[in-house]
Image: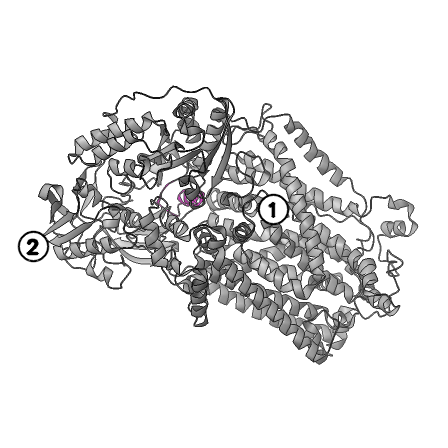
Amino acid sequence: MRSSRTPASGTGGEGGTTAGVVWRGASVLLWRVVLAAVLVCGIGLLPWLSRTDPALTVLKARSAERDPTPETLAAVRDELGLDAGPLRLLGQWLGGLLRGDAGRSWLSGTEVMPSVVQALGVSLTLMTVALAVAVLTAAAVCARSLRRGSRFGLVGRAAGGSGAAVLAALPEFLTASVLATVIGVQLGWLPALGWYGSQWMVLPALALGVPTGAILGRMLDDLLPAAFTEPWALAAAGRGIPQGSLARQAVRRCVPGMLPNLGLFVVGLTGGSVAVEQIFDIPGIGRLTLQAAIAQDLPVLQTGSLALILLASAAGALARRAAPLLLGPALRDGALQSLHQPAPPAPRTLPLMYGIVLLGAIVLGLLRDPLAVNTAARLRAPSWAHPFGTDALGRDLLARLAHGAFATLSVALAISVAALVTGVLLGLLPRLSGPLVDAVNAVPPVLSGLLVTGIAGSGPYTPALAVAAVAWSPLATHASALLRQERATTHVAATRALGAGPRYLLRRHLLPAVLPPVTRHALLRIPGIALALAALGFLGLGAQPPSPEWGLLLAENLPYAERAPWAVLAPAAALALLGALAVTAAGGVRLPRWTRARGSSTTERVDPLPVPNPPTPRRPERGTTPMRHTTAVTTREDSA
Amino acid sequence: MTPRRTRTTRFHRHHRLAAGLLACLLVSGCFAPGGGSSASDSSGSGDGGRLRVAFAFPPTQNYSPYGQDAFSLSRLGVAEGLTRLDENGTAVPALAQSWSSEKDGRGWLFTLREARFHDGGDVTAAAVVSALTHATQAKPAPAALAGISLTAEAAGDRQVRISTAAPDPVLPQRLSNPSLAVFSAKAYEKSGTVDPVGTATGPFRLTKTTGTTEATAERFDDYWGGRAQTSGIDAKFVADGAARANALRSGEVDIAEAIPVSQIASLDSGTVREVATARTTGLFLNARSGPFADPAVRAAARVAVDTSVLAKDVFEGYADPARGLFGPALTWAQGKRVELTGRAQAARVDGIAITLATYDNRPELPEIAQVLQQQLQRAGFTVALEVRESSRLLTDALAGKFDAFVGARNMMLDTGDPVSVLTSDFTCAGSYNMALLCDKGVDGTVAQAATIADLGKRQDAAMAAEAAILGTDAVVPLVHQKAVIGVGASVRGVLLDPYERAFVGAGTRR
């Protein structure tokens, strides 16, 4: 059994001849190399695409107050050899790379390779610790499901999720600056500046790990209830296996569905934690590439991005290897159960409540002027005149929040929908999208903004395009991971055996199984998208002051977070509320009807004790009785 | 079942062990090298009180003295040149003891003092000549040498003759620029770069640099100005203003440079020092194209702007309302201000649409722009804002794509000479002409000022040129900024330099 697992491990779990696997592996590798090449060349052409003179950006990055006289610019151009043109420069850099020499930084003239390696090392360390925090957070998020699930108390119960959604909506720069001020300065418990040892890692890792863990935990929590209703769980419970063990195996059953996303976080946390690096002054690769992107320091930018792509490929490959390891031969043999929620989530009053609070604040605020500057009333605490207080220019925050809502929500929602559609579609084609996801994910957001601007010009839709260009990747990853599992389920095998074609399978079985969790995932990321949009502002993209767009609102009030907490609290709370609303409402989206009328689901919901029989699957057409009760875990235990 | 489970557990344990080992390896390898000794152990004041300083601008060119990093070297007390500027903007002796002009101002003879390099050698005329010659050959040339050609030759062992192609009355001020600092021959050994580690002449000897994050300097016992009071400096470069303020508050550093206005209120009032700087924030109106090509519309904008709220509220008092281009930090300018005459009458504005651009590298600028937006809109303009990172803005601004521009400018940056800034910023051929002003009258007065050798008269002429520029309304000065420095309670003797070149000196201690 062990030996026969290898050929299938890299593929979609459908088996295949060794030659076919090798060919497929080679084509994926080729596609990976092509993508990396396209990205590196894109970076190499960036200044020429965007018509921004690198001599000028380098000069300004070297010394901000230097006059850009024609002679000075000519000297810089000469020094960097820019007149050779992008292709020659790119060729030189690639040639050097083959010898392990990534050239010299245009900005500082120092060698690129050591500085990138060192920054990457710092970032990897931070990422590792942040992931540990994320795992703990995810565990906390899922604790309730695990506890109840192992006692079979989950069936039909509304899953939580508000808490996780609120955590996931926390902008990391806000968490970071609050942690730095409160724990680092006011309490003095931990150092908040620099990168010298394990004490210095705690705060940044918390800032990065908590939102990440919340998203991961939420994804896991989405799958857990179904895992507990699988026959093996019932059988194990019947056999008297302790609840802790059961919970552990349930996690093991669900983790493969989100492993690829974990891989994405590995890269995202390594290359994309610029804000946290800045606040805690950590010399990581995020800041290095950001500085290089702004200065158009191409050798550094190319090397940094390439390093991140390699990391992304490695993380992706690891994640793909780990899934079969965890699930065992069941994945290959098509012996999995479908991880759907056994019963549709109950309709809930919670989203209604969140919605009313949010809407109420917006309606109240719409009657006020969001742009009236009154510097005499700056940073006023909340009062009757200004229920949410005022910002640094004395503007009413309630008004700004309300007037920014429409712009923020409509754009973020549109991007989310586009990302969802793209993500699911590309998720259906894992061999095409896998490497693409890795490449896209390795691109720091600012660089993606620059690249999209370079290609599409800076129109009104550029920022949305730039964010959408990367926003689909976690969704595609999620979708393809779920699909892979879904394809290996017994009911799909049964339907196929009954003669169903691929289209029917897709429409009736695969998509209905994959869409709900991916949609919930997409909703969970709406606040993040709003923040990403605001982060492009300084490139002259996206909302410009004095627009009250929420991301901008957060960014412009962040420096005052300590003196005027309300100024950041209002937009942060709004984003968190939005996240909670999106997640809780998603449970009800699929089931707006009253389920009480339906007999079977009612019994399921009220029965709090271990059900003697496997709960009847929801959909008759999918719910063929499991043909083989050998599921992932039991098979593995038997084979060991 | 039981034996199977044991086996699984063992399997897991192996994995955990491996993961733990891997984590240890990762963690141990990846901290900023050398940080342990300087950062974590120096919290006590045991070893004669080393100073821990948070600087705002990380080195961008690996401490090359020909760019902005020169200012870091100078502020660290590491490098110095032949002269330095006193608070009145006059050149006073540093490595040169005295000087005199010759050949109708085309040449200057500098007499060196007895001084030593950090590597032990004497500061000789030959060494100074070599250092200056290297500076003139740097590409691009240091900003202080922009537009002049300079040659240095030794005149005996202790004297250096510096000649320029055209008479340069401000050469002694020019030489105070940190980019013309003097380093020993060892610094120039590797061609194309200058290595300031252990090769300069200041009260502190740079001993180690760690990437762009840290630098360590030790007291230089043979400093010509006497031994420094502190035994060494541990400098950190922290770009984030809030992080610098936090580091000072938590006691991780003793001095923090450039505290942003938003963070000042969070510091103990006893730790805040302020110094007026030569930095003026102004509203530059596009005098070449668009609505502001009309002087009457520019006058309307000038009338609409109320600068008092900017200094009082946006800067929370850490700035002075503008009185002209040259602020109170330039003490000489205050008594010499010229009455403005011949300004245009403000036009009536009704719905003129303009774009107001600014950059966000300094956090106050977007706030100022938003206040101005409202003030201008009250006066009848329709204002769209454009806020970008400065290098993404500059080309468009100089190409006249915006109608108005809010920017900050150090009026004494490169040469310490008021006329050179006026030339680059407000004349037709100026390279930093944000107002895109091209006015014959202004060009004439500025050119005339540039020819005057006598310092006092040159300043008079500069003030006349200032009046001519302000008379065109192409620039509306907004505030004169102050630099705010956070200084720990026990620290004494921080140098508050309006020209932002000196910071830590021989007398700084804690």
Location of residue A143 by image quarter: bottom right
Residue that label 2 marks: B156
Task: Please name the amino acid that badge 1 sits on.
Answer: Ala
* In front of the other: B322 or B7: B322
Q: Position of residue B230 (x, y in %)?
A: 26, 48
Residue B152 lies, with reference to residue A311, above or below; the image says above
Marks 2 and 1, Cα distance to the nearest angstrom? 68 Å
Q: Point out residue A456 in the picture as x, y percentages from the top left corner.
A: 56, 50
Q: Locate the C terminus of chain B by quadrant.
A: top left
Q: For residue A423, what is the image quadrant?
A: bottom right
Question: What amino acid is found at the position of numbered circle 2 in the picture?
Answer: Gly
- What subunit carries mark 2? B
User: Which residue is identified by label 1?
Assistant: A464
For the point 26% across and 46% down, which residue is it? B146
Q: Which mark is residue A27?
A: none
Which residues lie in the magenta part?
B240-259
Q: Residue at x 38, y 48 (%)?
A: A60
> Quick check: is A308 in the magenta stretch?
no
Which corner quadrant of the image does residue A97 belong to?
bottom left
- Crowding around mark 1 (Cα neighbors within 10 Å: few <14, some 14 to 19, many 20+) is many
Residue at (63, 74) in percent of width and height: A26
Where disc 1 sits, the SS reads helix
Q: Residues within 10 Å of mark 2 (few under 14, many from 20)?
A: few
